[in-house]
Every structure is written in structure tokens, then in C-alpha cells.
Image: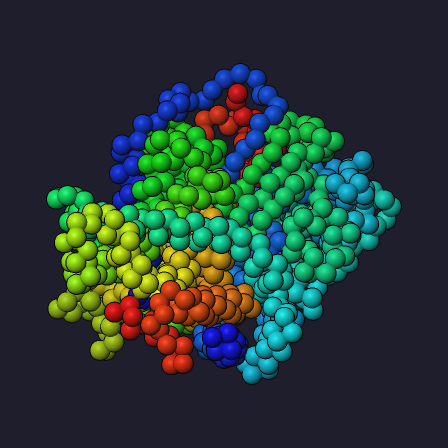
Amino acid sequence: MNGDYAGYALRRAGQAVVVVLLAYVFTFVVISVLPGDPVTATLRNPENGFSEEEIARIVAYYGLDQPVYVQLWEALSRFLVGDLGLSLRSDRPVADMLTEVLGSTLALAGTALVVAVLLAFGIAFGAQYLPRPFGPALRAFPSLFLSVPNFLIGLLLIQLLSFQLGLFRAIDADSPTATFVAALTLGIPVSAQIAEVLIANLDHEARQEYATVARSRGLGRWALLLRHLLKPSSLPVVTVLALTVGELLGGAVITEAVFGRTGIGSLVERSVAMQDLPVLQAVVALAAVVFVVVNLVADLVYPLLDPRVSLQAGPERGAAAR
Amino acid sequence: MSTSHTARRAFRIVIGLLAATVLATACSPGAAQTGGSGEPRAGGDLTFLIDSLGDTWIPNNSAISSFQGHVWGHVTDKLVHVDEAGAVSPWVAQSWERNDDATEFTLRLRPGVTFSDGTPLDAAAVVANLDLWAEGRPDEGIRPIGLFPKTYDRAEAVDPATVRVAFSSPTLGFIPTLGYHGSILISPATLARPATEQADLSNAVGSGPYVVESWRDDDSVVLRKRDDYDWAPEVSEHQGAARIDTITYKVVSEQPVRASSVRSGQADVAYNPSPKELESFKAQGFSTATPRYLGFVNGFAVNTAAAPFDDVRVRQALQHGLDRDEILSTVYTPDWLPAESFLQSNVPGATDHSASFAFDRARAEQLLDEAGWVRGADGTRAKDGTPLSVTLHPNPYLATSTAVDELIAQQLRAIGFAVDIRSFDVVTYTQRVDFGSVGLYEVTRSIIDAGTVSGILTDANNGEDWFGVGRSDPKLVELAAGIAGASDPAARDAQLDELQAHVLDQAYFVPITQIVQRIYLQSPRVHDVTYNGVAYANYYTAWIED
């Protein structure tokens, strides 16, 4: 099994490198075909009154007057030696800007993930075992969570918990309470997907023969859940969790804006608005790495949880989830 | 583009509704009494919530920004002080003289001024700053300061306290220039650093009443007061060290969160709340400030090279067809003033010409009739099969521009125009919308001194030629040249008055309203805030009630 693992991990690592490089090039091409660039845009701000010649010299400093393929080649060769370049917007090293915001986003996303999992399991268990009308009512929560916009949840939580109840200062974005409320905002929609899968699987497992047999032998409902139903029902959650990483990154853009947090999300928002290519490329590469790593981990964990999954063909998590 | 615009709009509307609901239900603890009382006291920490902290911190590249300018105003000093009315008074330069034709200036510096790194702010430091303002270092990405006189020739240190500055032609606007925007005095050691190091705010060393204690990109800047500061502008009512200990600029990009934070006492100042919220805040005892900056009013520069605006009657119909009072009462509040000219009324030399663009729908219709534009069945006018149409491009630098344009579109449709509105984000806007490329270009522009208008309105000296008139209007050319070359302020003011009358009569420029680009919502605990000529709040004299 170890040999299989090593070969498998190597193959996936190779794929990961290709994915990251392709994402890098793709971002470059997409942004290059858009009109304008941040440097020219700020120079052309009518407040400035620069002459065309002055603008041309500054644009030349940033290499923006070069043909696209030359710019791409420069960026790629720098990227391959680990140099992420300078931000067109701030003139600071992209690596510095990324490391500054990474911690904040990790704290937010990590807490949100925990919140989402706890919420999801709470809802699913409740839906399964709470008496009417509470149990069935809980089944509506996932679709409710998905239909309420993220920012609305955030603004409502801030208004209520900060401005009305004074539980935390909205502008102390990095305080534990503010981080928790932001994570709740981000975690709520994410929990919906996990809860939906979990509810469906618990329903499915509860109808299986072994469950009926266990029940007929007088096993209590909670004991049945914890001893027999939980493990097979939780397996697909691993798959959903891997997909959730994207949700967390995407949701972070809005959540960070609403809560005034600095993070990858706010960095992306600004960089997109300004077409700050070096920063965007670095973020896309980072996101690609995160995705590939998370999915790799899920693939490696899955066979350990479910011995039926064949390593030879590669784990088919998607099929199992259904 | 349009989808994301719609989504963003929907987002704003929901947030607005939410804010309004909260506003209606909010109790306002502790905000009941206004004014406050007692003596100024030292101490306290001020929190200022801002939409953004802009882009780079390279002083030359950032000091004209609407965001970083707040920080620079506390960390650095200027050679002269310019107040809200455009009056120039001594600061680091304690006096100055010029020769008769305004081509050579001598600045005498205040003794004992030091940068926070301990080095003296002497003549050599001033020369280093002047050279960089004028030339920048374009090959390193450091720009010259926009609007610094292009006539700059050289500066030299005569002795440690005297600087002589020479220009290639008369430059009456030089001294006021020293009080605006990017003309911030930075330590020569900082200026000698490469661009990437200047972009790190912790390397910025000025001589101002505050120093940078810490900063995080796009998140916050913390300033701490300098105890040995003793060179405030001569006109300042307060001298010596600042009163407030620290100022924290914190980025909160959502407008309702900024406003609610101040309302709930979690912060002291919110920058750029919604204009429509101001009245309710005032009613609850908060102070608001809408200082104007010195510059052009918000209005349209009309491209006379493009049909249908090549006909003066069509331009004049535009001039009289706009109901500016309706714009003021619908989009803005009584804090916004009607335009009196194409210059803001606080610009020295601006005069009242509001009669020449008074709202008169009947006259506007008559002008269009005379010009041969006939109304069709749908109310839109046409001539020889061509509809009378115009496209508006809301200026992305002004938050209220879209709302104003929607109203203007209605008003112009009423007199027979077919109006289209096309919105772009900043990057696309700067790429697609230009003076020559559109019929009506929406101006928001501060100016250093009325003397610079000639280089903007005509094509003289490589000017911007806003109206596409070129040399075809001899009167415009003559007036502009007279103002540019003036060496006597009184004579210049007379010509400036004539220029304003001419430009407005010809309807080259169609004013909308005076512009307020910076709005402040402030806790009643904060007192004695001052605003300079470019409408930046300064907390040097301010104090916070216990």
C-alpha cells in the first residue's frame, strides 16, 4: 500500500505543478486582453495632468510597453525561481503583500470551516432525531442558508452583535470575537452544503437493512447513529469539505469587505479592480496550490476511511458521494 | 461588465435599505447634546474610518490621492499654508519675494525645523523636494507631481535658510502651488531611496506633527504625535505639539458599517458617508463637514468639435436645460452649493456668472427649435434624419455621478435629447473616455491656482484643450494667454472674470453643482478640526472631550 501511495502522491504532485503553471499563464492571458492597466489608469487621472511623454517613460519602467509575450516570459521566468515580482499598484514586493494577509485569511477560513462542520452536524443530527416539528423544520435550514446572501448575514450580525449589543467593536477586525462572527458569516452558507449531504446520507443509511436489524434488536436511536450510521454517512463529507475550500476563498472576498478585514479576499478585490497582474497571478497560483493539495489530502484520506475504495483505479470520491 | 455593475448596484441598494432600517430603529446613546464645552485638553486617541488607503505610498505618487492625503497631511508640512478660502500664509517658508515678471522667487525658511529623523529642514532639503516634485524619477517609476508648474527651471540653496527658484516664464501660481496636494516636504534621505522602499510607509520621514507608528497595507495606519513639534502654520490658533496622542486610519470599505461605527461610538470619524444620511446624523447631534476644495465645479466640458455641440445654440440649450436646483435637492443636501461659474466659488478670482446658465426650459427649447432640431412623435428631436443624441459617462471619481446623470438624462430628454448613460470602472474609464472622445466630459478637477486654467482650457503650451476649440476662438486664446503670462494679480483677476463670462456664454463648460468630494461624519466629542484648501481634515489643533 505504501508503494501505491508514493507513486500516487508523485503523480498528483506532478499534476499539481502543471495546474499551477497553467493557471498562472491563463490569468496572464485573460488580464492582458482587457483594456488598460493600473499604472496608465492612475497616470491618466485628470488630477495629474501628465504629458504623454512622461506617461510613456513611467509605463516603460514597469515594462508595460513590451509585447505581451515578452511580459509573460519575464513573469514566468521570475515565477519559476520563486520571485513573485512587484505589485503594479503599490510598488511593493508581491510576496510581502501575500504573507501580510495570509494569516488573517487562514484564521478566518479555518474558524469558518470548524463553524461550518459543527453547524452541519448539528443540523443533520437534529433533523434526524429531534421531535416534530423541530426536526423537519431543520431540514429547511440548508436551503435557507444558501439563499440568504453572505453579506446580508454579515451586516445583520454586525448590526445586532456589535452596534446594538456591543459585544465587540466592528472595526477591531482581528479581535477573537470579531473573527468568530466573521467566521460564522462565512461558515453559514458553507455549512448548508455539508448538512445537505449529511442529511441525505443519514436518511439513506437509516433505511439500510443493518440499521433495521439493529433497531429491531432494541438499539437506541442515538446509539445507532453514533455506532453505525455516522461513519458511512460522514465519508462523503470529506469530498464536500475539499470542494468547500473554494467556497471559503470566494466567500472571504465579501466577508472580509463587510468586516473590514485585510486578507486574501480584500487583496483580490483591490487587485482585480486595478488589474494588478503580478498580485493576481500570485494569488491564482496560491489558490491552485491550495486546491490541489486539499484534493490530494482528501484522496489520500479516503481509502483509509473506506477500505472498499480501490487505490489502483484511483479513489472515486465523486461516485461515493452520490 | 454590465452584469457586475447591476450586481454591485443591487448590493448597494440592499445595504442602503438595511442602513436606513437600522437608522430608523437606532437609538443614539450619548449623542443627544451638541457642541460640548470646556477647554481643549491634551490626550486621547482618534479613530478615522476611511473607504480605502489607496495604492502606493511613494510620496510623489500618492499625496494627491483622496485617501493617502489624510495621512500625509499629519506626517508632513508644507512650505506655505492655503486655507479653505484659498488664502496663502507662511508655514515652513516664513516669507517670500518675487521679481516683477514672476519668473524668480526667493523663499526664506523658518529656522529650527527638523524632520523626525533629526535632520534639519533646510534650503538643501527644500531644493531636493522641489527638484523631485518638478521632475520625478520616471525611469524608476517615481512621477512628477501633477500640476506642478511645467515652467520650473531650477532651484538653488543660497544659504541654509534661503532658496531661490527660477522659472522659464511668469508663474504667478507658484506660491499657492506650495500649499496644495503633493507639495509635501519629505526628508532627503527618504527621497534618495528607491521606489520600492519609498512605497513602504514606515520609511516615510516628514517634519509634521505626527509620525508613522505602524501600518498595514490596505488595513490601517497608526500615527503618533511628535512631542517636539513647534512649527505649525503661522495662522494656526494652536502651536506646539498636537493635542491628540494617536490617530488611527482604519479601512472599512462598506459605507453603512463606517457610519454605524461612529453612531455607536466605536469610532470618531467616518469618511464619505452617504450624502443623504447627513441630515439624520445632524439631527442626532453628530457633526458633519462638507468642505469644498479649490478647483473646477462638477460640470461638463463640451466638445465643440463633435456634432451636435459644434452649434453654439445646442450648447446653450444644454446650459439652460439643466435644472440644477432639482439636482441639489434630489441627490444632495443643503450642504452642497449651486455653481456660480465653472470655478468653485472659493477659488480666488472666481466670480458669479450664474445668470448666464440659469435654468429656463422654454429658452432651451427655443434654442433647439432655432437650430433646426424638430421634435418627432416620441418627443426626441431630429435634424435631417439624425436624432439629437448624447451619451453621458458618469465620472467614476465622483460617487454621486451616476445618480446625478440619471436626473440629467431626464431633464435633457424633456427638451428633446435622446440620452444614453454608459458607466465604466476607473481603469476602463481612463482608457475609453477622454476630452476628445466624448461629447460631454464630466469634470472633477482641483486646481493649484486659477492661473493654470489657461493651460487646461486651450491648447496653448501643449494644453489640454478641453473644448476642442484649439485656436479657432481668438477671444478665448487671447484671454487664456493673458492669464498665463500675467505677473500682476489684479490685472489677472479682471481677465479671469472675462474668461469665465466668455466660456459660460459660449457654453463651452456647462456647470452642474459645486463639488464636495470629501464628506466627514464626526462624533460630537471631537472639537476644533480644521480643513485646508483641498478639503482634508486636519487634527493637529483638534481635541477629544473626556
Nearest the eye: B489 or B431: B431
Nearest the eye: A137 or A122: A122
Seen as rendered, the residue at the extreme top is B38
> Which quadrant of the structure image shows residue B381?
bottom left
Q: Is residue A161 left or right of residue B74?
A: left
Residue B513 locus on image (x, y percent): 39, 48
Nearest the eye: A51 or B38: B38
Q: Residue at x 47, y 34 (%)?
A: B267
Q: Is residue A228 visible?
A: yes
Q: Residue at x 40, y 53 (%)?
A: A113
Residue B23 locus on image (x, y percent): 30, 35
Q: Is residue B398 left or right of residue B474?
A: left
Q: Residue at x 26, y 38 (%)?
A: B21
Q: Residue at x 31, y 27 (%)?
A: B27
- Which of the colour schemes (rainbow, by chain, secondary structure, one colour) is used? rainbow
Residue A99 locus on image (x, y percent): 58, 57
* Above/below status of B85 relative to A102: above
Residue B84 locus on image (x, y percent): 54, 38
| Number of dots carrying numbers | 0
Q: Is residue B412 visible?
A: no
Nearest the eye: B444 or B7: B7
| Quarter in which the C terminus of chain A is drawn | bottom left
Seen as rendered, the residue at the extreme front is A217
Q: Is residue B97 left or right of residue B341?
A: right
